[in-house]
Image (cartoon, helix red, strand yellow):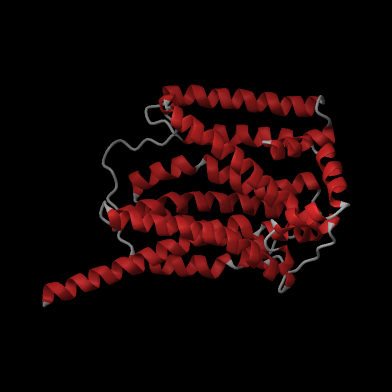
Amino acid sequence: MAVASTTVQTVRRQRFAFALLCLTQFMVVLDASVVNVALPSMQRDLGLSTQALQWVVSAYSLTFGCFLLLSGRAGDLFGRRRLLMGGLVLFSLASLAGGFASSGIWFITTRAIQGLGATLVAPTTLSLTATIFAEGPERNRAFGVIGSISSSAFAVGALLGGLLVAGPGWRWVMFINVPIGFLAIVLAPILLQESDAQAERRHLDVPGAIIITTGLIALVAGLGEGNVLGWVSWQTIGLFLLAVVLILAFVGIELRSPAPLVRFGIFRLSTLRGANLVALFVLAVLSLCCLRLPSICKGCLAIQRSTRDWPSYLWLWRSWRSRTSPRAWLLVLASKPPSSAGWFL
């Protein structure tokens, strides 16, 4: 009887812990899409130019993507629950600060910090899920659930963003993360067990992460400012050259690092190369949709802040039926070479 009772309590605790991890994953993915619908309102209230507006999305994506491998390694060395809680604190405080932003620089900075917090949360969520469930069908189902929640969160973010912008205002797309984040912070030490930190030499490739992040920021800045400064201006060319130098420096650092972020030998696998190229093209188009469609819909179709912005993909059907939208499309594509290339890919 005592053994059965202990088993029931273990299963119940396991389910509560998994529910908490699902909640954190939902929050991180939700934030990636809930902001997109509010971009036109942010641009108006904060006085952002079109070039500055792209950094609302790019700042989050760059810090999230570039530090992702580093945070996964840090979780193995210093404890996954500890890293998860640190990421939740950073993410929640950045969301709170972003909701009170009074300038574009302030808001973009908080978005970058949000991305850094999210990159601490995302890999540790998956790692902790793997420790909760034994290898086999049970763990596979758990990863399937998290994948489904991630997809649902991205879709829900578009709908929720429209509701928040139409209701209390765009600042609530930031404030909504705060109660979820602090609830997860309170429950994490109760429901999650700390993983054993590795006793091996603790080496983190921090220089590599910083250099590749700076290089990609220079690349994005060059692509974003090319329309304004001119594609052959010394500022644009300087940004591209800086990006190339930093990316090559990153490759050199990784080849010599005892614990590199990226082991380039894995790219010998043709399936991995193909999968990465497909992911690159899909995410390039998806990111462009998230950035451009809310503004295009508002300008070309006179769509105001409402739940009609959900989902933005409805605009594709309406543009096909409309006689004027194709012209607007041509004007937009002709004036935005990088965007046109993204749509083509």
Query: In this view of the protein, which residue sits in the foreground, 275 or 104?
Result: 275
Q: Position of residue 168 (x, y in %)?
A: 71, 73
Q: Quadrant of residue 332?
A: top right
Vertical comparison of 187 with 120: above or below: below
Vertical comparison of 131 with 14: above or below: above
The answer to whether residue 130 of the structure is visible from this angle is yes
Work out which residue is located at the far bottom of the displayed protein and give it.
Answer: 1
Residue at x 43% of width, y 49% of height = 123
Vertical comparison of 331 with 164: above or below: above
Q: Quadrant of residue 187?
A: bottom left
Q: How many discs mark residues in the rendered view?
A: 0
Vertical comparison of 85 with 343: above or below: below
Q: Quadrant of the C terminus?
A: top right
Work out which residue is located at the far front of the displayed protein and give it.
Answer: 321
Q: Position of residue 337 (x, y in %)?
A: 78, 35
Relative placement, left or right, of 61 versus 40 is: left
Q: Quadrant of the N terminus?
A: bottom left
Q: Position of residue 264 (x, y in %)?
A: 44, 26
The answer to whether residue 190 of the structure is visible from this angle is no
Relative placement, left or right, of 245 versus 306 is: left
